[in-house]
Image (spheres, rainbow, N blue to C red):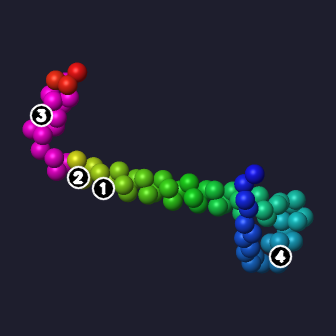
Amino acid sequence: MTEMATVSAKIEKSKKEEMEQLGISPSDIIKKAVDDAIRERKRQKLIKEMNEAGKLIRNIPKESWVQAIRESRDER
C-alpha cells in the first residue's frame, strides 16, 4: 500500500461550508490538483529538455549525421 502524507490548506470558511453543502470532498480536490500540478510541471520540464536537445542537435554538422548513418549501416 502507498504511504500517505498529510497536507493542509487554509480556505475561506464560506467556501468550506459551501463544499460541505455540495458534498465536495476537499481531499479529492487536493489530490486531483496535486496530480495535475505534477503532470504539468513534468510536461514543462520535458518540453524544456527537448528544446535544449534540439539546440544541440542543430549544431551538429550534416556531414557528421551522414557519416554516423553510413557507419551504422556498415555495422549490420
Label 2 close to label 1 by CB (< 8 Å):
yes
Q: Which of marks 3 and 1 precedes in the sequence?
A: 1
Q: Amino acid at mark 3?
A: Gln
Q: Give the label, 4 or 1, closer to the camera.
A: 1
Distance from Cα at disc 2 to Cα at disc 1: 6 Å
Secondary-structure class at tag 3: helix
Q: Which element is circle 1 on? A: helix
The tag earlier along the polypeptide, 2 or 3, is 2
| Left or right of 42 on screen, residue 35 | right
Q: Identify which amino acid the numbered label 4 is placed on.
A: Ser
Q: CA distance from mark 2 to mark 4?
A: 53 Å
Tell me which residue sits at (48%, 53%) in the image: 43
Determine contact: label 1, label 3, CB under 8 Å. Answer: no
Compared with 75, 9 (above or below) is: below
What is the span of residues highlighted in magenta in the rendered image? 58-73
**CA separation, marks 3 and 4?**
68 Å
Give the labeled residue for mark 1. 52
Q: Which mark is residue 56?
A: 2
- Disc 1 residue type (three-letter): Glu
Q: Position of residue 47 (x, y in %)?
A: 40, 53
Q: Looking at numbered disc 2 in the image, what kind of residue is underneath it?
A: Leu
Earlier sequence position, callout 2 versus callout 4? 4
Q: Is 33 positioned to the left or the right of 44 in the image?
A: right
Determine whether, in the image, residue 72 is placed left or right of residue 42: left
Query: In this rendering, does residue 29 appear at all?
Result: no
Residue 67 — which label?
3
Single out the residue that lies furthest toward the front.
Answer: 75
- Main SS, magenta residues: helix
Which residue position is annotated with label 4? Answer: 14
